[in-house]
Amino acid sequence: MALRQQIMNMAYFRAKTWSSKSMSSKPPKSSFAKSMKPLKEFKRSWIPKISVVGAGQVGTAITCMLLLRNLTKNLVLLDINYELAKAEALDFQQASAFLNDARVVPCGDSANSKNSDVVIITAGARPSGKDRSRLAAMQKTVEILKKAVPKLVELSPNATFIVISNPADVMTYAVQRIGKLPKHRCFTTGCHLDTVRFRNLIADRLRLPPSQVHGYVIGEHGASAVPVWSSVSIAGIRLNDVVKSLACGDDPENWAEINGQVTSGGLAVAKTKGYTNWAVALTCTDIVQAMCGGKGKIASVGTDMQGMNGIKDNVVLSLPCLVTAGGISHVFELPLTDVEQRKLLASANVLLEAQCSLDL
Ligand SMILES: NC(=O)c1ccc[n+]([C@@H]2O[C@H](COP(=O)([O-])OP(=O)(O)OC[C@H]3O[C@@H](n4cnc5c(N)ncnc54)[C@H](O)[C@@H]3O)[C@@H](O)[C@H]2O)c1
């Protein structure tokens, strides 16, 4: 093969490699760069840039899942503790060859997060001390968000923001207000996690694969969450049509036990570990996959639901939503029983009260 052709082939090969790997189009720092001739016509294919804010237990678990699922090659790990972000990023970067050549960049002051497509916020104070409720850690996390969010929005004005920091619904409200972000482009994974717990617990009783059990938990990602028993179905069979008094009335099979297990699922893990991370990381990754994988997904995620299912106020809570590339495109109003509707409105009131108590 003529030398010229060989060089052209090499340049083409390298150009393809850049398209899927590098965060910058700068040539490598080596004399080898002379053998890499850029082709002007080449257009970089779209690869989402994702910033994970907070390099703690949750942020690193999310990073791990996103990379393993090959959802990005440009990941920025941001923490106010820059040394921690650097160490965690380096730990991933060293294994880049096993992560589809992804690049993980640490960041301490948001700068590297510029032009992110997705920003995932996990920075926050963990529930601690005697009162381990999510609401207790609230104002401390708001103060963190007040510092972090304006800069993140300024640097990535078109990004979709996913809020994980607890209490997730109230913190989403805070991020929407602080960042002046529209509700479709700033939401929380919310009850998507409670929903998978719910499905898992039902599947366990029925000895079926959890993926074959359908249903939703709605409302607060927390104590007032509402498992929607009336919508649970398996293979097209509504559970409520077969099991009478399902989680209500005399409830001879004690299905109501599951309600408590759904809302205390996180505490059951945190009691021993001190935190939870894997389930929420998988939940968040599932949502990012819906957005970046091109398929979309209906999931119980949380945003400002004013006008939905009888909710009158601007309150952030979870209802089934269609999540697609640009965020939430539709909200589904579930047909609820009177009891479920009352519980949803009670959950909205709990959250509204928490929202109103914020010092934003
Ligand atoms: N939504 C959910 O389902 C869910 C599940 C589990 C945990 N959480 C929440 O996720 C949050 C993180 O949990 P964790 O276990 O990773 O906590 P963690 O303490 O391990 O990590 C939090 C990280 O945030 C960083 N941080 C603090 N201020 C920052 C700032 N201004 N900018 C950047 N980084 C900053 C800290 O340095 C720390 O590394 C908590 O609020 C927790 O309650 C939510």
Image (cartoon, grey):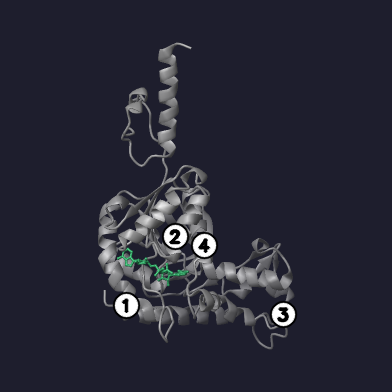
Decide: marks 4, 1 in contact (CB < 8 A)?
no
Distance from Cα at disc 2 to Cα at disc 4: 14 Å
Decide: marks 3, 4 in contact (CB < 8 A)?
no
User: SS at mark 4?
Assistant: helix
- The tag earlier along the polypeptide, 2 or 4, is 2
Which residue is tagged 3?
A: 244
Measured as percent of width and height from the top left, residue 280 is found at 50, 65
Binning the other alpha carbons within 10 Å of mark 1 as few (below 14), some (14 to 19) or many (20 upward) gives: some
Binning the other alpha carbons within 10 Å of mark 2 as few (below 14), some (14 to 19) or many (20 upward) gives: many
Which disc, if any, is residue 283? 4
Left or right placement of residue 275 versus residue 152 in this view: right
Which disc, if any, is residue 226? none
Amino acid type for the residue under numbered disc 4? Thr
Measured as percent of width and height from the top left, residue 114 is found at 29, 50
Decide: marks 2, 4 in contact (CB < 8 A)?
no
Distance from Cα at disc 3 to Cα at disc 4: 31 Å
Residue at 49% x, 66% y: name it.
277
- In this view of the protein, which residue sits in the foreground, 51 or 200? 51
Amino acid type for the residue under numbered disc 3? Lys
- The tag earlier along the polypeptide, 4 or 1, is 1
- The tag earlier along the polypeptide, 3 or 4, is 3
Which residue is tagged 1?
A: 139
User: SS at mark 1?
Assistant: helix
Q: Is mark 4 within 8 Å of ligand 1?
A: yes
Q: Nearer the viewer, mark 2 or mark 4?
A: 2
Which disc, if any, is residue 60? 2
